[in-house]
Image (cartoon, rainbow, N blue to C red):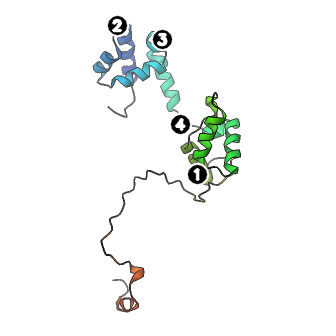
Amino acid sequence: MRGVELTLEEREAISRGLAEGLSHRMIAARLDRNQSVISREVARNGGNAGYRAADAQKRADERRRRPKAFKLETHVRLHDAVAERLSADFSPEQVSNRLKKDFPDDPEMRVSHETIYQTLFVQARGELNTRLKLAPRSGRAERRPRGSTRPKQARIAGMVGISEHSAEAADRAVPGH
């Protein structure tokens, strides 16, 4: 059931299982879920003693709410720190790593490089009204993640491109064929 959210009924079954004193593994088996799903759910919602299905469902609904505000839009101090480093010609990945070193004890001052990229490229399309008016160093208007999922086109061995054909071949070409 990978990728399927827990339902209120499943959360109630978790609550009942905890009340019976069952282990997370046993509850998971009853629900046909992975044990780690149950463990994370219980840990993020009060632990074994404090887990309440209705409260857990309410928190899940709040986390899911869309549209979410960009982190750099809602945290002014973080936004200013990112803007300062980008203007000093740091890449988003360098900015992210530098913030971890500059603010080791402040979790509010952490942001992933992907969040910075997403903020930059959404803002470049005019959807984000923020003070971060900096272009990425690459100069591109769109984000192309490193791990592109586009399949690579196969190359034919010894193939000659159209631009490399001789002038004689261009004379034989019939328009539209």
Q: Which kind of residue does numbered mark 2 sit on? A: Glu
Which one is closest to the eye, mark 4 or mark 1? 1
Q: Are marks 4 and 2 in contact (CB under 8 Å)?
A: no
Q: Which kind of residue does numbered mark 3 sit on? A: Gly
How would you rate the neighbour count of disc 2 (Cα within 10 Å): few for under 14, some for 14-19, many for 20 or more?
Answer: few
Helix, strand or loop at mark 1: helix
- Tell me the quarter of the image containing the N terminus: top left
How would you rate the neighbour count of disc 3 (Cα within 10 Å): few for under 14, some for 14-19, many for 20 or more?
Answer: few
**Mark found first going from the N terminus, 4 or 3:** 3
How would you rate the neighbour count of disc 1 (Cα within 10 Å): few for under 14, some for 14-19, many for 20 or more?
Answer: some
Q: Whole-percent x and y of residue 52?
A: 46, 14
Q: Whole-percent x and y of residue 33?
A: 32, 25
Q: CA distance from mark 4 to mark 3?
A: 28 Å
**Mark found first going from the N terminus, 2 or 3:** 2
Q: Which kind of residue does numbered mark 1 sit on? A: Phe
Residue at the far front: name it: 101
How would you rate the neighbour count of disc 4 (Cα within 10 Å): few for under 14, some for 14-19, many for 20 or more?
Answer: few
Note whether 121 is above or below 65 in the view shown.
below
Left-right relation of 44 to 136: left
> In terms of depth relative to the viewer, which is nearer, 102 or 149?
102
Which one is closest to the eye, mark 4 or mark 3? 3
Q: Are marks 4 and 1 in contact (CB under 8 Å)?
A: no
- Residue for badge 4: 66
Q: CA distance from mark 2 to mark 1?
A: 50 Å
Q: CA distance from mark 4 to mark 1?
A: 19 Å
- Residue for badge 2: 20
- Residue for badge 1: 121
Q: Which kind of residue does numbered mark 4 sit on? A: Arg
- Residue for badge 3: 50
Q: Are marks 2 and 1 in contact (CB under 8 Å)?
A: no
**Mark found first going from the N terminus, 2 or 1:** 2
Q: Are marks 3 and 1 in contact (CB under 8 Å)?
A: no
